[in-house]
Amino acid sequence: MDNLKLWERYKKYLCVCPEIDLMLDISRMNFPDGFLEAMEPRMQKAFAEMDALEKGAVANPDENRMVGHYWLRNPPLAPAAIIAAEIEFNLREIREFAEAIHEGSITTPGGRRFTRFLVVGIGGSALGPQFLTDSLGSSHDRLRPHFLDNTDPDGIDRVLEEIGVQLTETLTIVISKSGGTKETRNGMLEVQRAYAGAGLSFARHAAAVTGRQSELDKVAVEEGWLARFPMFDWVGGRTSATSVVGLLPVALQGINIDGFLAGAGKCDAVTRNTVTRDNPAALLALMWYHATAGRGEKDMVILPYKDRLLLLARYLQQLIMESLGKGRDRQRNVVNQGIAVYGNKGSTDQHAFVQQLREGVPNFFVTFMEVLRDREGGSMRVEQDTTAGDYLSGFLQGTRQALYENGRESLTITIDRIDPASIGALIALFERAVGLYASLIDINAYHQPGVEAGKLAAGTVLALQKEILAYLRQWQGGPLDAGEIAVAIGREDETEAVFRVLLHVSSNMDHGIAIEKGENIYDSRFKSRS
């Protein structure tokens, strides 16, 4: 297609949303004439299902729960007055707590102001806050953010070493909806030990974000933590960025949470529009359907040309893949749905994986993220009439064109600047697109049976480890290989799992297991050091 025809296609399909300073360009997606019209009946059905969800329909039948993240930025939409009141009260608690921390009316036991906070969480309890604090943070943050988002001991050590002696001025926020998430519990216990080792009271440095009457909630009450904030059971982890999960950290950081919520709320209003051509979330969902044949046949590559959006791909990985990666549709038919998401940032990607995008396997479509405002204030010239930001824009346009010339599809989301409102709008845009796409392919976006299966499997492995350790500690003979130990504990059909457990526990000093390596690693023998 020549450039003049491309320009006409660009004008025809450009979706401009001045209410949220956002544009969506789908012209470089090669959908055929008539595609949007053919999909319109299904799109209208998706709109109707989204309307029912917002009005309180049970959207997660596995847990018999409503899904109400849209109410968080517009409480009057909630289907019951008590829910709206709870949201408003929760917001007031967040604002008042953050203000008290900033003003120094809540301090450390030694009377010092808090200067940092540490979030202990995983998945939706960390990815949203990490994206928000990184995209909106600055050198003027009221509190500096840190995160423990895994149960990796070395990773925990790195974060605590980075905080160092400033632990005395660090507020720890433990986020777990159930209060029993093992990774979060482990991180909390490690942090508690660090505070104790520094002669500090963990409880007087801690706040809990959790479900009412959860294990964590009870612990916070019993130990007298500084604060407790409820997580609503109708908000899922991957859609919790506009809940207390995301709001409390950014409020402590000093970011305008009202602007953030307003941006999300305005985007919700824009994306409720049932005129498909004027609804950017609907167009996104339709482009996903076109690109992947409604079957996840291609990956989604997120390329934000802005450093502050580096973590957007990680955030969208959970939002999109956990929501859409489902084995069965709503009729219980096996469908194995999903869209794989990955990304980096421009123009770093020019020197990383764009080579494959242009020349390699055409198993993807690209979402370019463009931010028009380079920085606050003017920029120096790096060449005549050219700034560093001009180069960034040029690389985006050049990459987009180079991909198109080689038959690679892309769409481009353009926003005016990075601020709380624009980040709120982006989050709301993708949340709505996920919900609409799920309707188009007839799956439930709001449950996650695969995640629970992984947790159950991990519990089985840890139970096996306890059996292995108990046996070796009472064994009085010589060292044994994995097969002998598996037979001894009645787990012969799980010999590989036994070996992998032994390999791990013998590599660390914690359990007192020694290894005598064989000629082949799987022939190694193990014994208790005691």
Image: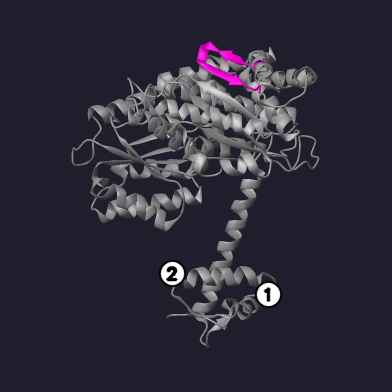
Q: Position of residue 261 (x, y in %)?
A: 46, 21
In-front residue for pair 473/344: 344
Q: Residues in magenta?
A: 13-27
Vertical relation: 525 (above or below) 98: below
Give yes or no for residue 152 being in the magenta stretch. Answer: no
The amino acid marked with disc number 1 is Glu
Q: Please name the residue shown 22% across and 30% down the image.
A: 104
Total count of labels: 2
Q: Dot 2: within a 10 Å radius of its alpha carbon, few (fewer than 14), some, or many (20 or more) residues?
A: few
Is residue 240 visible to the viewer in this orientation of the structure? yes
Label 2: state its secondary structure.
Answer: loop
Q: Dot 1: within a 10 Å radius of its alpha carbon, few (fewer than 14), some, or many (20 or more) residues?
A: some
Vertical relation: 45 (above or below) 308: above
Displayed quadrant of residue 340: top right
Q: Position of residue 151 (x, y in %)?
A: 46, 53
Q: Quadrant of the N terminus?
A: top right
Residue corresponding to mark 2: 508
Q: Quadrant of the C terminus?
A: bottom left
In-front residue for pair 511/47: 47
Q: Please name the residue shown 34% across and 45% down the image.
A: 223
Quick one: which residue is furthest to the left in this view?
111
The amino acid marked with disc number 2 is Asn
Vertical relation: 327 (above or below) 5: below
Label 1: state its secondary structure.
Answer: helix
Give yes or no for residue 26 being in the magenta stretch. Answer: yes
Q: Position of residue 345 (x, y in %)?
A: 49, 37
What label does residue 492 carry, if any?
A: 1
In-front residue for pair 366/424: 366
In-front residue for pair 411/519: 411
Measure the C-alpha gap from mark 2 to mark 1.
Answer: 25 Å
